Amino acid sequence: MTVTETPAQPADQFPHFTVLLSSTRRGARLARLLTEAQLRHWGLPTETASQLVAELAANAATHGRVPGRDFRLMLYVIGGTLRIEVTDTRGDRLPELQHPEGTAESGRGLLLVDALADRWGVAEDRFPRKTVWAELCFSGPEPAPTGPGTAGGLPVKDLGEKEPDQAPPFPPVGQHRGAAHSGG
């Protein structure tokens, strides 16, 4: 596992976190747990973001899996927006929003992403990769929970405000500056 994290940043940089994980159910679960830990470290709400990561990582491990190749999770914050990116090595399999029958046992992951994210989409990367991204807007760090049963969560805008396939306003994958590298 390779982890990259940047702590407090000068004005021209932004906090971000990157990790390579095995394309397995265990890797997908670890992506969710690492997301929760990182967002807590940044003082941000965790609940909605960790649900998005769980779905995107599960899709990468299930539909984007190539034996022996990892998927990458990247989190970063610019202004009041958290961006989640999950990159896998199955660029030939682009995700599509499906509407499965009521008795179907799978096929609802992107419906959940669509419901929770303010924006989401797919960016084709250098072959054979693709990146599925989701964005959550928030007003800033949430105060620490003070009582039992409290959980962080990001506000969800009305579905009408979404722009799922619009190009992302952030720099393309791989053009992040000032990353501190640590092996793991």
Image (spheres, grey):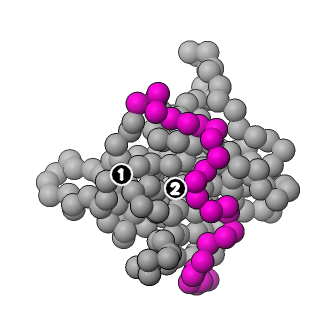
The residue located at (64%, 46%) in the rendering is 167
- In which quadrant of the rendered view does residue 71 lie? bottom right
Q: Position of residue 168 (x, y in %)?
A: 61, 50
Task: Determine whether 97 is above or below 3 in the image.
Answer: above
Q: Position of residue 48 (x, y in %)?
A: 41, 46
Based on the picture, tell me whether residue 63 belongs to the magenta stretch: no
The residue located at (20%, 47%) in the rendering is 149
Residue range in magenta is 158-184
- In which quadrant of the rendered view does residue 106 lie? top right
Left-right relation of 83 to 147: right
Q: CA distance from mark 2 to mark 1?
A: 11 Å
* Residue of label 2: 83
79 and 127: which is toward the camera:
79
The residue located at (46%, 33%) in the rendering is 161
Q: Amino acid at mark 1?
A: Phe
- In which quadrant of the rendered view does residue 69 lie? bottom right
Q: Residue furthest left?
A: 147
Left-right relation of 87 to 137: right
Q: Where is the N terminus found, in terms of image quarters? A: bottom right
**Residue 40 numbered tag:** none
On the question of residue 60 being in view, the answer is no
**Residue 138 numbered tag:** 1
User: Could you tell me which secondary element the residue under label 2 belongs to?
Assistant: strand
Left-right relation of 24 to 14: right
Q: Position of residue 159 (x, y in %)?
A: 46, 29
Which comes sooner in the sequence, label 2 or label 1? 2
80 and 117: which is toward the camera:
80
Q: Amino acid at mark 2?
A: Arg
Q: Residues within 10 Å of mark 2 (few under 14, many from 20)?
A: many
Q: Position of residue 127 (x, y in %)?
A: 85, 56
